[in-house]
Amino acid sequence: MSTQNYTRRSFLRSMSIGVASLALPQLAVGRAKSAQRKKERPNLLIIHTDQLSCWALSIYAKQRTDTANYGKVLVKTPHIDSLAQEGAIFYNFFTNSAVCTPSRGCLVTGRYPHAHGAYKNNIELNRDEITIAHILQSNGYETGYAGKWHIDGPPKPGWVSPERSMGFADCRFMFNRGHWKKIVEQPEGNPEVSPYKVIGDEKTFTTDWLADKTIDFIKKPKRKPFFYMVSIPDPHGPFTVREPYMTMYRPEDMTVPNNFKDSPTGKGRKITAAQMQKSKAHYCGLVKCIDDNVGRILDTLKDENILDDTIIVFTTDHGEYMGEHGLYGKNQWYRTAYQIPFIVRWPKKIRAGTVINNFVTNVDVQQAILGLMGIKPCGREQGRDASGLLRGEKIKWADEAMIHHASLESAGIFTPEYELVMKAKDNHMLFDRINDPEQLNNLYENPKYRKVQNDLAQRIIRHNIDVNAPAVSWLKKLNIG
């Protein structure tokens, strides 16, 4: 080898090493910046429950003293309470439709029931809807879901396939509907559910089982931020829960609503106050089981050192009347089924102890969360962006919550002062929410409130016209002065 050739190769090799040594720091900086950007993108965890009334959570029960169901803490829920104490609590959060399917559709699409298609129970979501999971998935998020979905039509349990999971990639434990008390994972195929009367243990009881699946997902190694939604099908009936929760609360300690009425069952018998109190005690046990599992999930986020890097949302689809007005369940017109818990924790953007009294609803959630994350929504949403409220900003906001009843023959509005419900077949309802919080006196026929009811009715009509709701057809025919 000639000295000249050797010298040339040595020079080129030294140059390449030099260039590489210059490039490596730049590459390292680029990777560091990319990693930092990824780190700054928060995870999102939505903990969703079924038929959970505000009075069953201690942080909400302590806030009100104007009804028999409030002012007395029936269940201490320290883990759920901690989310509010370290984040934001909404005291006037409403579902737009107080029944499972439409409420869930509003939450994941930001659209009203007639628009997303699943306007009553057991109807599937329009297949072209864009969910929050779709949006986050397209923004580089790893998505997953476990628990009750209830917007894929009538299948029961209806374990959801990836082709129908609406943006939730990890849908292994996503089922359409049902309220079983025991679920067992199988080596192959879908998990096995037991008859409702069979109650599982701390590993197979549905709430515990779903919390385990959430914990497994959180612990799984990831290269992307995640969005996970766990949908617990309790405290919806049947009101049974594993021990020690089943006997944790005494029926005689349960409050009886001032507007309680004995109500007839399908067999002609009446549910008495004592029977209601027994059911309520079991309901409280279900809530306590949920809170303990929320604690387990929070501990996992702490152990993984990602608690403060995760936006945590806690909410439900609707409340439970538990004997008020002689009613059980939901899908009537009274406040308890509509005004529901909504709590958000993310210390990087939300000041601890934030209290939001503005009226916010399910259709506002998608834009609020995406706005908090700095991610653009898809543009089809019909709700409003409440992220400014979460950040403590002063923004223009109308305090109203619109009702879209599953029958399509009723429409209404909640305001700070009143609730008005208009019906296609008359029997309209107007309640003074300040002086009559238990909604005992229907003021609709009272001439003193004629202007109030007409003003509210016009707001209902304008809203339904704006969102092209089917109720417009009969609302326009009403004789509203």
Image (cartoon, rainbow, N blue to C red):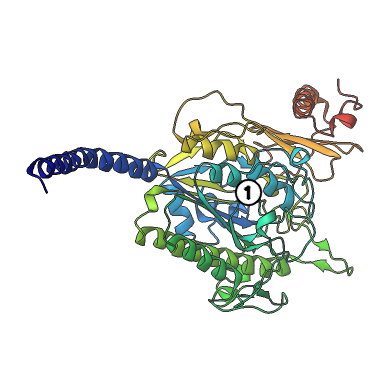
Mark 1: few, some, or many residues within 10 Å (few <14, many ≥20)?
Answer: some
22 displayed left or right of 181: left
Residue flagged by tag 1: what amino acid is it?
Answer: Thr
Splitting the image into 4 quarters, where does residue 205 fall? bottom right
Q: Is residue 185 left or right of residue 330?
A: left
Quadrant, the C terminus? top right
Q: Is residue 121 left or right of residue 305?
A: right
Residue 42 in percent (x, y) is at: 43, 45
Expressed as whole percent of the image width and height from the top left, the position of residue 106 reads 68, 43
* Number of numbered discs on residues: 1
Q: Quadrant of residue 160?
A: bottom right
102 left or right, relative to 65: right
On the question of residue 361 being in view, the answer is yes
The quadrant where residue 109 appears: top right
Q: Secondary structure at mark 1?
A: loop
Asked if 240 appears above or below 70 in the picture, the reply is below
Q: Nearer the viewer, residue 38 or 55?
A: 38
**Residue 240 at what x, y percent from top left?**
66, 72
> Which residue in the rendered view is the most extreme toward the left?
3
Q: Nearer the viewer, residue 182 or 358?
A: 182
Q: Residue at x 68, y 74 (%)?
A: 193
Residue 259 in sight: no
Question: What residue did someone put label 1 on?
Answer: 67
Q: Is residue 201 above or below residue 162?
A: below
Q: Residue at x 87, y 66 (%)?
A: 266
**Residue sitting at 57 percent across and 36 percent down?**
367
Image spot of residue 170 (x, y percent): 57, 59
